[in-house]
Amino acid sequence: MILDPILDIFRGKAVTIPPMDGAFRPNTVLDEADILTHLSEPDNLAIYKGELIATSGNAIYVVNKGAEPKLLRSFEAPITALAVSIDDKLAVALETGQLFVDGEPVRLLEEIKAITALAYSYDGSLWLANGSSEHACSDWAADLMSKKACGSIWVRHSPKEAFEKVAGGLAYPYGLCPLSGGRVAFSESWRHRVMIMDAEKNISVLIDQIPGYPARIVPTAEGGAILSVFAPRNRLVELVLQEKHYRHDMMESVPREYWIAPALYSNRSFLEPLQCGGIRTMGVYKAWAPARSYGMVVRLGKAMNPLTSMHSRANGNRHGVCCAIEHDGQIIVASKGGDVLLDIADIKVEG
């Protein structure tokens, strides 16, 4: 019983990642989808007063098909999270760690440094995901490479109350989805899973071994949800995460955009890693080549189980999907790495 752990020091451990199969089976739906509009690094999506809004940098835009995005509001720092209540109250979080509700600043504890997601529940409570207490949202790669687990979930039941911490020690919570009965589902990116918290604050695993890094979760009208996956898992990154000294040397001496780490986009510089692993035939980059970036949207059923998914594979360019929502019978997808919003006919899947 003691022998195997001792031998692991000398022989190492196998680097394995779950396959993209079943509900995660690859396809080209995102690459074949219609472009709703071009927008620089679109991140958050929501429906505000009946209209689709999207964030880009420090601004919020109203988006309509066939028209240029119209500026709704701008802030002094990049927007990291967005939520709209049933009565159209707009909650906006910034890169600086600030939170505004209907334009008014909300006082937060110093621990909240990286607001990755906001969500209003059916009773009006405002939920907040703090990805890390040590790194800002723009430093997410450093948080992953440091192997941190200092994220947390907070809730405020009324505007007169302060935010209450309801879960800690999380490995970068990135999405929030309030459910019925006081429950809330949330993604935990660095552990590649979706968790659920019940009304008594007990936490359990909902979806495990996701073949990528999950981002935001947005509820659908039928009771399910749409989960975005912003980057793929691959063996080289998993190996680097096991090598402490190599990882720290890389972080100290290599520019961040060239780290062996997940990315929102790739194939823009000859200095990027993993290019030699790219599988090409007759000069064509193959869809199954190893990649640092990817695009995936997963439809979850009423039991929050994966039903089907939409992909932009290694040879595509609609990567870095951080958010996707339903709107007017369509699924709207924000490709942060592809600088586009996509418009996809919503195919209902029972489950």
Image (tube, rainbow, N blue to C red):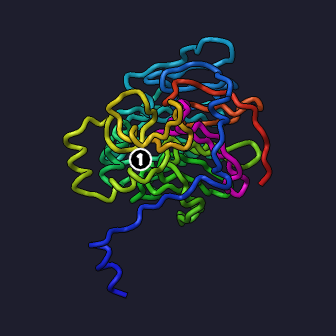
- What quarter of the picture does the N terminus occupy? bottom left
Residue placed under numbered mark 1 in the picture = 131
**The furthest residue to the bottom:** 1
Q: Would residue 44 be visible to someone looking at this image?
A: no
Instruction: Name the secondary structure under disc 1.
Output: loop
Q: Answer with the quarter of the image where residue 274 lies.
A: top left
Q: Position of residue 267 (x, y in %)?
A: 43, 30
Residue range (magenta): 293-320
Q: Position of residue 133 (x, y in %)?
A: 33, 48
| Residue type of the residue flagged with mark 1 | Gly
Residue at 66% across / 41% down in the picture?
Answer: 27
163 and 292: which is toward the camera: 292
Residue at 62% across / 42% down in the picture?
Answer: 297
Q: Answer with the quarter of the image where residue 77 lies.
A: top left
Give the total of numbered labels.
Answer: 1
Q: Position of residue 129 (x, y in %)?
A: 47, 47
Q: Position of residue 230 (x, y in %)?
A: 51, 41
In the image, 162: left or right of 30? left
- What quarter of the picture does the C terminus occupy? bottom right
Judge whether residue 294 is colored magenta: yes
Residue at 37% across / 42% down in the picture?
Answer: 140
133 and 28: which is toward the camera: 28
Residue at 65% across / 31% down in the picture?
Answer: 332
Q: Residues within 10 Å of mark 1 (few under 14, many from 20)?
A: many
